[in-house]
Image (tube, grey):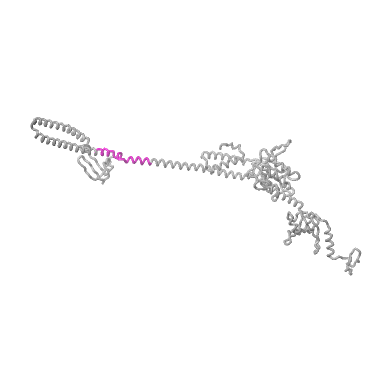
């Protein structure tokens, strides 16, 4: 080599000659040795070009850069496995390790033996660790989150009194529900001393004479570091321990602070937090309209039920009284059907016919008694004659006695005869036959004595009793004088 | 019904809760007619009062201020200015 001067310039001193030249391998090894001789380096930079661990080997290849330089980086699989976080483009990381030259390509890489987050990444890692610690303590358990009334009428707001946030809260609630009374408690929401002021603000709000229904802990949007105040451990513990339920609305939608995690209700923004404390006034008006309808429906239901009861009672009363009346009517009609009322003459009739029979019996008894006495007297007379035939001596005495006996017998009979005649005369006077004998007659229909022309209709059988017998016939016509 | 406060003395929340109780009691149907009519009258009174309060509601805002000896005092701050929104 070096035998040709192709450039036309004279080979001069600093230039090596072919004789002095190193092979590529030698040169690369020289460089590699120089890199190896460097002490362990810790380097701060931003991850770029990270595409995840290599699918086959598990090693990570990416670049780390700052404003003006960049260098390839390698994190071996074993190192990455021990790492507590996942690498992402844009992350600020601290890499500790050394440079290495890959001889087949001559490419220099930084091989990290350990890596750690820096900047916001570090903060986020610390926040995540604190969150995990508090979670393990149970500060984020749903069970310890307090119930917040659906309609808080007195609300304390702990935030900066100088920012736009307090106005947003006031305006939101004035528009949504002016019945919510607000008590504003001022506190710094970022920078040194902010957590302490917020802790004090929570305590002052909770200690209000008339305790609020809830406390709004709110702050407008900001950078991650601005919002770090709400990742403060002491403040988080104060939120969890606050005797009044705390609602947080910190930053914007995706921001979640530790205070959000331990609060009783987490809202994404201060406005959302304010809206969550009470229903809108239009909802209240609708609720009142609903209640008005329910009140009217329930009351008219009660009144209608009472009216139905009353109607039912009236109906039952009517039924009861008409049943009682019907019963009384039946009883009365049963009385009315008694013979004594339908035909009062029948009783007299029956008694009269009984009396007739008695009179007949009495008459027969009288006759029989007379016959019996007559026979007895005849018998005695016969016996007396037979006896007197044998006794002739005292004849005149006997004849006298016989004559006295006759007289006595006659007078004995005469008394009875006279009594009997008197009774017969009385009986005769009482007999209905006597009435009949005067020209009256008794008419009978099929049921007995007929006392009314109404009992008959043409064609009915008719029987008429006269004093000396009966006539039977058929009614040919009825004339009603009643 | 025993401890009835005048409706005007009740807070919105108290009045609203009493109204709900009355409606529930009426809806349960266990009430005597006279009692239910009394409840209805009370309910209508509460309803009217609640409506008026909704219509007349004025936001109350105060600020908790530290006074010279370190104690807390409530200072009235007046309602939020929403005049710009009302024009919308």
Q: Main secondary structure of the magenta part?
A: helix
Is residue A214 shown left or right of residue A429?
right
Image quarter of residue A40: bottom right
Q: Is residue A394 above or below residue B77?
A: above
Callout count: 0
Is residue B76 shown left or right of residue A315?
right
Which residue lies most toward the bottom here?
A3
Q: Quadrant of the N terminus of chain A?
A: bottom right
- Give the image location of residue B88, x and y in percent: 66, 46
Image quarter of residue A415: top left
Q: Is residue B68 above or below residue A234?
A: above
Is residue A108 shown left or right of residue A367?
right
Q: Nearer the viewer, residue A308 or A211?
A: A211
The answer to whether any part of residue B83 appears in the image is: no
Residue A71 lies within the magenta run: no
Identity of the residue drawn at 55% across and 44% down: A294
Is residue A132 shown left or right of residue B46?
right
Q: Nearer the viewer, residue A168 or A362?
A: A362
Q: Quadrant of the C terminus of chain A?
A: top left
Identity of the residue drawn at 84% across and 63% down: A27
Q: Is residue A386 above or below residue A113?
A: above
- Give the image location of residue A210, x and y in percent: 66, 38
Residue A347 lies within the magenta run: yes
Q: Is residue A72 above or below residue A205?
A: below
Over which residues does the magenta segment extend?
A326-352
The answer to whether any part of residue A41 appears in the image is: yes
Image quarter of residue A65: bottom right
- Give the image location of residue A96, x and y in percent: 79, 55
- Give the image location of residue A277, x and y in percent: 65, 44
Which residue lies most toward the left here?
A393
């Amino acid at each position: 080599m070096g035998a040709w001067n192709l450039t036309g310039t004279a080979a001069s001193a600093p230039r090596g000659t072919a004789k002095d030249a190193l092979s590529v391998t030698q040169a690369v090894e020289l460089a590699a040795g120089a890199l190896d001789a460097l002490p362990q380096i810790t380097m701060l930079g931003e991850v770029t070009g990270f595409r995840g661990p290599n699918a086959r080997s598990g090693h990570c290849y990416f670049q780390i850069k700052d404003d003006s330089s960049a260098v390839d980086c390698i994190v071996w699989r074993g190192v990455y496995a021990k790492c507590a976080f996942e690498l992402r483009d844009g992350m600020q990381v601290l890499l500790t390790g050394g440079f290495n030259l890959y001889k087949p390509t001559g490419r220099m890489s930084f091989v990290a033996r350990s890596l750690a987050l820096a900047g916001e990444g570090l903060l986020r890692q610390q926040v995540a660790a604190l969150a995990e610690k508090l979670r393990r303590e149970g500060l984020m358990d749903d069970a310890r989150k307090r119930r917040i009334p659906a309609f808080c009428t007195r609300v304390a707001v702990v935030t900066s009194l100088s920012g736009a946030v307090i106005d947003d809260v006031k305006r939101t609630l004035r528009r949504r529900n002016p019945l919510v009374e607000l008590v504003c408690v001022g506190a710094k929401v970022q920078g040194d001393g902010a957590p302490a002021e917020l802790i004090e603000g929570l305590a002052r709000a909770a200690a209000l004479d008339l305790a609020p229904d809830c406390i709004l802990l709110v702050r407008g949007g900001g950078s991650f570091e601005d919002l770090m105040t709400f990742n403060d451990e002491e403040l988080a513990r104060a939120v969890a321990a606050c005797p009044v339920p705390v609602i947080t609305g910190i930053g914007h939608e995706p921001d979640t602070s530790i205070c959000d995690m331990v609060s009783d209700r987490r809202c994404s923004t201060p406005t959302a937090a304010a809206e969550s404390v009470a229903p809108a006034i239009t909802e209240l008006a609708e609720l009142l309209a609903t209640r008005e309808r329910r009140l009217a429906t329930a009351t008219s239901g009660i009144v209608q039920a009472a009216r139905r009861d009353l109607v039912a009672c009236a109906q039952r009363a009517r039924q009861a009284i008409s049943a009682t009346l019907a019963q009384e009517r039946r009883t009365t009609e049963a009385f009315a059907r008694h013979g004594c009322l339908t035909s009062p003459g029948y009783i007299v009739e029956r008694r009269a016919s009984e009396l007739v029979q008695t009179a007949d019996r009495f008459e027969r008894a009288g006759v029989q008694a007379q016959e019996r006495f007559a026979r007895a007297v005849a018998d005695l007379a016969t016996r007396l004659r037979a006896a007197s035939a044998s006794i002739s001596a005292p004849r005149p005495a006997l004849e006298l006695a016989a004559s006295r006996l006759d007289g006595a017998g006659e007078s004995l009979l005469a008394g009875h005869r006279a009594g009997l005649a008197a009774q017969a005369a009385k009986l005769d006077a009482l007999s209905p036959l006597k009435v009949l004998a005067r020209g009256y007659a008794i008419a009978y229909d099929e049921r007995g004595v007929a006392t009314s022309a109404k009992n008959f209709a043409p064609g009915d059988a008719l029987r008429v009793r006269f004093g000396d017998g009966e006539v039977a016939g058929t009614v040919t016509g009825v004339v009603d004088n009643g | 019904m025993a401890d009835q406060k005048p409706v005007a003395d009740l807070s919105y929340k108290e009045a609203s809760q009493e109204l709900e109780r009355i409606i529930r009691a009426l809806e349960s149907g266990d009430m005597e007619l006279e009692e239910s009519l009394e409840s209805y009258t009370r309910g209508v009174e509460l309803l009217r009062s609640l409506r008026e309060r909704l219509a007349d509601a004025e936001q109350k805002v105060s600020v908790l201020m530290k006074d010279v000896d370190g104690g807390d005092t409530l200072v009235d701050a007046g309602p939020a200015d929403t005049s710009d929104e009302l024009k919308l």
